[in-house]
Image (cartoon, helix red, strand yellow):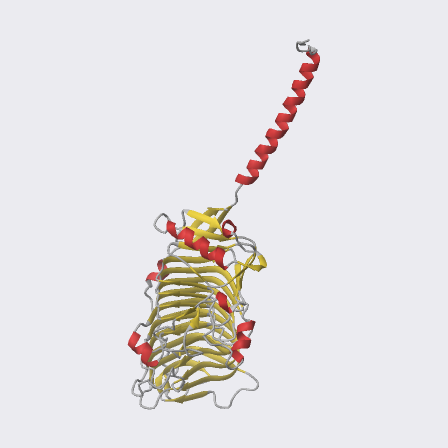
């Protein structure tokens, strides 16, 4: 017999509807909350010369921040994808908290690499993750080795509008393996990589980062212009080989500000090519500002000019510098065969403590890329100005050695007081083949730097004009991620 539907009491129907409504409300709430979790975002603000319209996270491209998983392919894929936005407001790659092991990767134009404060980039220990690239044309066939060189951890060439920044994230080159190879004869086939190198590029910003344990130099802009390096901390063991802090090399319009550097080599170096190769390439370093720098470098100097200066170095302005435990304050090194020039150098307001020399100049720094250099190529060193400096615990005020027949000229030193260490040298100023003037210097300078006397107090020059790079301002930018 076909039976019809059984009647259900009205009260039971009502109770079932209430239960169903509660279940639906619970499910709906969880779905909404789940969506909120997926769409909830954090806005990160930062300062930069250029803001970006597009952004992505390294994790969107398979990045794993566990310190052991290689992320080289993820970096390369992410930057390759984001490069499509270079003409559409530019792009930003966000590196979130974690330890991101990677080999060398190349940047793109109109691009920002942003490191979270708890993000650490770890340089790979596998040489295969570091491509070998050609030597620099202004240096000839070698620096530390014959032949090519390993590409830097972060590299780029022929770029415009490139920013590497963060809220003090860390780039760790894990350089100890490279240092051991450098000290072991015949192990390294190519020149060690740097942490950051940008070639033939313009409008570059490197800021708000910590760089540690570079295999060699830390920051190396070369053949580039309009460069700002600001609020960067650079740390390397004081016995690590060639771990220069910042090397400005054949560049125009650069600004270095508010940086703290502990290095196994020079804190800041100005370069422009080596012997006949630098002369032929002919690209000087000029119009450079260095301000508010703090330096420790027991092996080398606060600021060094050269020794590779064959393309010329001109119009460098440094002020408000602090150094403790450095080998020297300011060093100029060159030699016969370099050619080129170091001129129009202006340095003021240095505070120095514990060092061998305050001023060190040599015209006999005779390292050469090969035997093809021109023995008649003499460097020009002139119009070098130092003023308003205080140093203490110093062994020797200055050793200034020019080149016979090619003296360093136009040296001016004023208002400089050097406090001597207990083991100070008897001869405080050693000068050969130099000329210039001095005023208000203690202890008194050598006779070749003619003391102007108390009746003619002079102040060495420091330019009053403003360089274009000084006028570039940061904007407040943000991204969601």
Q: Position of residue 214 (x, y in %)?
A: 51, 69
Q: Is residue 231 left or right of residue 50?
A: right
- Residue 153: image location, x then y, percent: 47, 65
Residue shown at 43%/89% (left/top)? Answer: 430
Front residue of 442 and 473: 473
Which residue is at the front of the view, 465 or 201? 201
Which corner quadrant holds the N terminus?
Answer: top right
Residue 362 placement, left or right of 13? left
Whether residue 325 is visible here, answered yes or no, is no
Residue 142 quadrant: bottom left
Asked whether 51 or 258 is in front, the reply is 51
Is any part of residue 133 visible from this angle? yes
Left/right placement of residue 22 relative to residue 178 reads right
Q: In the image, what residue occupies the spot 52% across and 58% down? A: 71
Q: Quadrant of residue 421?
A: bottom right
On screen, residue 21 above or below 314: above
């Amino acid at each position: 017999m076909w039976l019809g539907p059984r009647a259900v009491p009205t009260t039971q129907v009502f109770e079932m509807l209430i239960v169903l409504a509660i279940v639906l409300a619970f499910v709906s709430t969880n779905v909404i909350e789940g969506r909120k979790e997926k769409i909830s975002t954090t806005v990160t603000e930062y300062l930069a010369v250029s803001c970006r319209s597009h952004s992505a996270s390294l994790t969107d491209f398979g990045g794993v921040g566990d310190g052991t998983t290689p992320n080289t392919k993820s970096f390369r894929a992410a930057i390759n994808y984001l490069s499509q936005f270079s003409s559409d407001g530019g792009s930003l790659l966000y590196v979130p908290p974690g330890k991101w092991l990677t080999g060398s990767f190349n940047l793109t134009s109109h691009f920002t690499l942003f490191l979270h404060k708890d993000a650490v980039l770890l340089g790979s220990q596998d040489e295969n993750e570091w491509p070998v690239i050609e030597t620099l044309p202004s240096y000839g066939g070698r620096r530390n080795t014959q032949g090519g060189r390993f590409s830097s951890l972060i590299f780029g060439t022929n770029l415009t509008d490139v920013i590497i920044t963060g809220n003090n994230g860390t780039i760790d080159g894990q350089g100890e393996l490279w240092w051991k190879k450098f000290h072991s004869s015949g192990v390294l086939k190519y020149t060690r990589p740097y942490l950051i190198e940008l070639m033939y590029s313009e409008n570059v910003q490197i800021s708000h980062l910590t760089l540690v344990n570079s295999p060699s130099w830390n920051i190396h802009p070369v053949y580039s212009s309009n460069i700002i390096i600001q609020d960067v901390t650079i740390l390397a063991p004081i016995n690590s080989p060639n771990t220069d802090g910042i090397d400005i090399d054949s560049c125009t319009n650069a600004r270095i500000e508010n940086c703290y550097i502990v290095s196994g080599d020079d804190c800041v170096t100005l370069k422009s090519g080596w012997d006949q190769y630098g002369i032929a390439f002919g690209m000087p370093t000029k119009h450079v500002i260095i301000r508010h720098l703090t330096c420790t470098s027991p092996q080398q100097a606060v600021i060094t000019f050269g020794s590779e200066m064959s393309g010329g170095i001109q119009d460098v302005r440094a002020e408000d510098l602090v150094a403790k435990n450095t080998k020297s304050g300011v060093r100029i090194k060159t030699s016969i065969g370099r050619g080129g020039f170091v001129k129009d150098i202006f340095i003021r307001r240095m505070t120095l403590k514990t060092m061998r020399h305050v001023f060190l100049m040599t015209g006999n720094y005779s390292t050469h890329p090969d035997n093809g250099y021109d023995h008649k190529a003499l460097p020009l060193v002139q119009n070098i100005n130092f003023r308003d400096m205080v140093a203490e615990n110093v062994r020797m005020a200055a050793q200034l050695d020019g080149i016979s027949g090619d003296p360093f000229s136009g040296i001016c030193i004023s208002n400089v007081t050097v406090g001597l260490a207990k083991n100070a040298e008897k001869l405080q100023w050693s000068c050969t083949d130099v000329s210039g003037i001095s005023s208000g210097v203690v202890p008194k300078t050598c006779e070749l730097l003619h003391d102007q006397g108390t009746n003619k107090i002079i102040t060495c020059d420091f330019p009053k004009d403003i360089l274009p790079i000084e006028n570039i301002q940061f904007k407040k930018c943000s991204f969601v991620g």
